[in-house]
Amino acid sequence: MDLKKLIRDIPDFPVEGVVFKDITTLIKDAEGFNEALQQFYDFAGDKGVTKVAGIESRGFIFGGALAAKLGVGFVPVRKKGKLPAETWSETYELEYGTDTIEIHKDAFEPGDKVLVHDDLLATGGTMKAACKLIEKSGAEIVQISVLINLTSLNGSDRLSGYDIKSVIEY
Amino acid sequence: MDLKKLIRDIPDFPVEGVVFKDITTLIKDAEGFNEALQQFYDFAGDKGVTKVAGIESRGFIFGGALAAKLGVGFVPVRKKGKLPAETWSETYELEYGTDTIEIHKDAFEPGDKVLVHDDLLATGGTMKAACKLIEKSGAEIVQISVLINLTSLNGSDRLSGYDIKSVIEY
């Protein structure tokens, strides 16, 4: 099954000149959704994952499903102000301006082996910030998995040293 | 297993006087996460679900996991402006002001049997709006499932006629 065919290109979203990769056409397709999830599961293989972290909010969809399939817990990495208990924050650069993401301080424990999931890897800024937050807890990141890797934006370079897996590459 | 024990009360979040039910302590717990998911799966039983809809953003976590477990596709119900293709919108009243949610016009087809999931049912405003959007597509809602039903807020009254299931009630 060619999963790439289930991704829809949306020109000029969210801003003019950007071609947005719409994953909703893949995830609403039972076969496509299940096959991508199976690939994530196979990637995780013998990594000994103890928790899956998913990045708000599209990263929650496969992230939650993957945690369930692996039989482990799920931790949301959220935008600033959304998590109700004590958090650690990390601010990172965007093309214009900055953004901040957070995790609960008690989300992970030393010894946790974490798989970090998001739908898309572009420049890697958000993913790098998520990894920093998770490692602050003393947990170890054993894999980063994304549905789509926009390889021309070199997100992988920023995340060297990590085991990065993707289902679809452009 | 008493799943209620895994829910954390956060006083005065997001505003003073509100006691927020924090589900992150349940979903990071492998056993708790899996048991709640199993209950959602059992609720869905013989309903013939063809798609799961999850409401942004906490509804994506169990929503994605449940779609995978049921072997069906997943559709996100999102806040205004987040979905890239053509959408239907529904605006609903909050205690102060209004909010708007959207779905892609091509997310569902007539004949789809939809399970709508969110983490929490309070007054039911968001859920009611989500149901309206989904029914606009000609799809049928066969179940509403939530992790937590705050029964004192009478959300179920607003959703009469629907099959509403919850794992935890307060």
Image: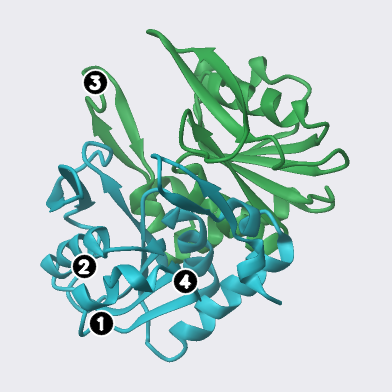
Chain colours: A green, B cyan
In front of the other: A107 or B7: B7
Residue on which the image places disc 1: B162
Q: Give the chain of mark 4.
A: B
Residues at discs 2 and 1 in contact (Cβ within 8 Å): yes
Please name the residue shown 65% across and 15% down the image: A158
- Whether residue A71 is visible, yes or no, is no
Q: Give the chain of mark 1.
A: B
Residue on which the image places disc 4: B170
Q: Give the chain of mark 3.
A: A
Q: Amino acid at mark 2?
A: Cys
Please name the residue shown 81% across and 43% down the image: A113
In front of the other: A113 or A101: A101
Residues at discs 2 and 3 in contact (Cβ within 8 Å): no
Q: Amino acid at mark 4?
A: Tyr
Left or right: where A17 falls relative to A117: left
Q: Give the chain of mark 2.
A: B
Residue on which the image places disc 3: A15
Which of the marked residues, 4 or 2, is nearer the chain's N terminus?
2
State how far apart marks 1 and 3 are (Cα): 39 Å
Q: Is residue B35 above or below residue A89?
A: below
